[in-house]
Amino acid sequence: MLKKSIAILISCLMAIVLLAGCAKTKDDVEAIASQAANVSEDATKVEETAENAAEAAGVPSDTASAFYSAYMEEKSAVISKIMDGLSNNPDTMMSALSFLGASMTDLYMLPAMYFGLGETNVAAALAAMGSKDVVYQENGNSYTVTYKNSDDKETTLTGTYESGKSLVCTGSTDGTEDVYSETYRTSFGYVGQFYYIASDGTATLYQFSVSGEDGAIGMTTGGSRPAALTGKEAADFPKSAKEWYAINGMTITGLNSEGASVEFTYTPSEDD
């Protein structure tokens, strides 16, 4: 089941990349948005597999894996709901494309879903992605996973977990740090941010705030590594980003990539 779940996730991501390269019509955009929504849904399947692995191994429920998986499940639900709303609204269809990168952050953070579950489970998860030479280290509340990715580049993700409160991670490729991620539990749910530097040097920051099925997501391209979160951020803190979208009940608001305000009533897809 583990290999199948991750294989589906990878297939969805590959489809997104291919579709994004040829999007010329509204139908293309709808197809891309649909595939992007599937990323969130299938990432949840991977998260459920991590929980099953933990139960089978007799791992305590209070682990970095359980903490991050709970956050990812809520975040994925919010992302999926906002993308569904944007893609179903003729005036905001193109804005759904902004979520491709936000959806892919879970792929980079996949090893964190297995922090605390042991090397066997981590190795199985990464092997399904075409990775090899997996080395897993655990020292108290600190975790490090090193492996060679499908491009044969050495990739490392290191995380520090504060029980029930936060998970802070850094990642690198061939010795160069290119990922910084934080997740905090708050009084209303979770806040998080994911900062990524692409191979061409372009940096992108995604900021998240989730409270049940409500939440906000901000996206900023360029800039340096963000200041650390504290866990005391307001629920609307992602709205300081250059581009952001939020859902509150059945209302979606935002500021699109062109600086125009967005506000409309969410209409779920017929099959939701």
Image: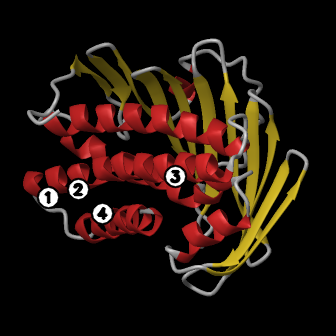
Q: Which residue is mark 3?
A: 106
Q: Which residue is mark 2?
A: 32
Amino acid under disc 1: Asp
Mark 1 / mark 3, whichever is N-terminal: 1
Q: Which quadrant of the rendered structure holds the C terminus?
A: top left
Q: Which residue is mark 4?
A: 16
Mark 4 / mark 2, whichever is N-terminal: 4
Report the front residue among 18 and 160. Answer: 160
Q: Tags 4 and 1 in contact by the CB under 8 Å rule? A: no
Q: Tags 4 and 2 in contact by the CB under 8 Å rule? A: yes
Q: CA distance from mark 3 to mark 4?
A: 15 Å
Decide: few, some or many residues near mark 1? Use Cα within 10 Å; few <14, some 14-19, many ≥20.
some
Above or below — where is 13 with respect to 55? below
Q: Is residue 72 left or right of residue 66?
A: left
Amino acid under disc 3: Asp
Q: CA distance from mark 4 to mark 2?
A: 6 Å
Q: Is residue 266 left or right of residue 131?
A: left
Mark 4 / mark 1, whichever is N-terminal: 4
Above or below — where is 170 with respect to 263? below
Callout 4: SS: helix
